[in-house]
Image: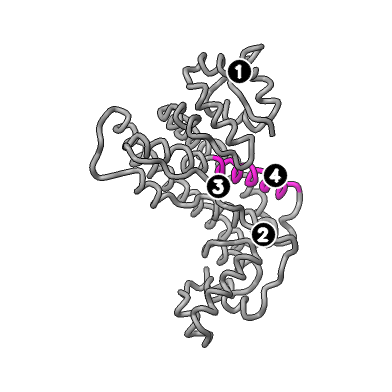
Amino acid sequence: MTKIYKNMKMAELVESNYHLLSILSRLEFNGSFAERTAEEICARYSFDADTFILICNVYTSKGYKPTEEELRQCSISDILRYLHSSHNYYIDSALSLLSPSLKSLIAPAPQVQQKVIWHFFDSYKEELLKHFSYEEDTAIPYIQHLLAGARPSNFSISVFKENHSNIEESLSDLKNLIMNSLPAECNGEKRIEVLSNIFHLQEDLKHHTYIEDRILVPLVEMLEGREPSPTFIAPAPKENEDAEVLSEREKEVLAEVAHGYLNKEIADRLNISINTVITHRKNISRKTGIKTTPGLTVYAILNGLVDISSFE
C-alpha cells in the first residue's frame, strides 16, 4: 500500500485503509474530518503527528520498517498513550464482543466440550490480562520515570524484552480449533462471526506487538543512552496449503501431551527417544496449526483422541 504522510487529508487516510478507524476510535479522535489533514486532526487532540503517522504506516504497510529518523521524531509519551488505549480496547471492546458470540457458537455442543473450549478462552483472557498488567504496572511506569529524568536501578527495557510473551499463539490456537475441530452442530453463521472477530483481533495484536518490540523498545534504548536494537521483522511462518493427517504415533504423542506428561515422560511411556518426541510434537503443531499445550489438549478432546471423562 501507499505510504501515509501527515499532510494527507484524514478522510483520504481512512479511505486508504479502513482498519485505521479502530486506531482513531481508541485514541478518541471523534467528530467530522471535513477537509482537515492528519496533522491538523492530531493537533486538535494533542497527539504527535509523526507518531500517529508511524502507527498508521505499521497498520497499513505489511512489514513496514521505520527509519532511524522516523523513530527519533516519535513521541514516546504518545506511543505509551496509544498502547494504554489499545489495552483498554482489547479488554473492554474486542474481547467483550467475542465472548458472547463464542458462547452462542458452542451452545449446541455437548456440555463437556463447551466446558473445555470455554476454559481455554478464559485462560487466554487471563493470559492477556496478565500480559497487559505487566506492561501497565512495570514497563510503562519505568519509561515514564526515564522521561522525567529518573533512572530506576531495578529495571531496564532489556528486562521487558526478555519477559515480553507472545500474546497471539493461544488466540491462533482458538481460531484453528473453531475452524477445524468443532462438532458439526456448531457450524453456521455464528462461526463465521466468531472467526471474523478472531482474525481481526489477531491481526491487530500483531501490529500492537510490533509497535512495542520494534518501535518502543529501540526508542527506550536510546533514552537509556544505548544503541537501539536493529529493527527487523522475523520471517513469517509458512502456511500449510493442505491439511495433513496426524499419524497414529503422532496421535499417541498428542494424547500423552493432553494428559500433561512432559517430553521425557512421554519418551519413557512410549519407549522412544526424547528427540523423537520433540520431532513428533513439532509435526503435530505444524499439521494442526496449534502451538500451545492447552490448545493441543482441547484439540485432542474435540477429536476424540483422549477419553473425555478423564478431564471431568
Whichever of labels 4 and 3 marks the residue nearer the N terminus, that label is: 4
Q: Position of residue 168 (x, y in %)?
A: 54, 50
Q: If you read the primary sequence from the N terminus, does the residue marked by circle 2 or circle 1 appear first?
A: 1
- Tell me which amino acid carries mark 2: Ala
Boundaries of the magenta span: 189-207
Marker disc for residue 233: 3
Q: Residue placed at 64% from the left, 19% from the top?
A: 8
Rate crowding at label 4 as few (under 14), some (14 to 19) or many (20 or more) other CA atoms within 10 Å: some
Q: Secondary structure at mark 4?
A: helix
The reply to whether the C-beta atoms of the residues labelled 1 and 4 are less than 8 Å apart is no
Q: Residues within 10 Å of mark 3 (few under 14, many from 20)?
A: few
SS class of the residue under badge 1? loop
Disc on the earlier residue, 1 or 3 = 1
Asked which quadrant contains residue 172, the reply is bottom right
At numbered mark 3, what does the secondary structure look like: helix, strand or loop? loop
Which residue is under mark 4?
193
Which residue is at the far bottom? 271
Image check: 25 left or right of 179? Answer: left
Would you say 52 lies left or right of 305 here? left
Marks 2/4: CA–CA distance: 17 Å
Mark 2 vs mark 4, foreground winner is: 4
Would you name the residue on which mark 2 appears?
109
**Disc 1 from disc 3: Cα separation:** 28 Å
Q: CA distance from mark 2 to mark 3?
A: 40 Å
Q: Residue 65, image x and y in percent?
A: 56, 39
Q: Is residue 200 magenta?
A: yes
What predominant SS class does the magenta segment belong to?
A: helix
Report the colour scheme.
one colour
The residue tagged 1 is: 7
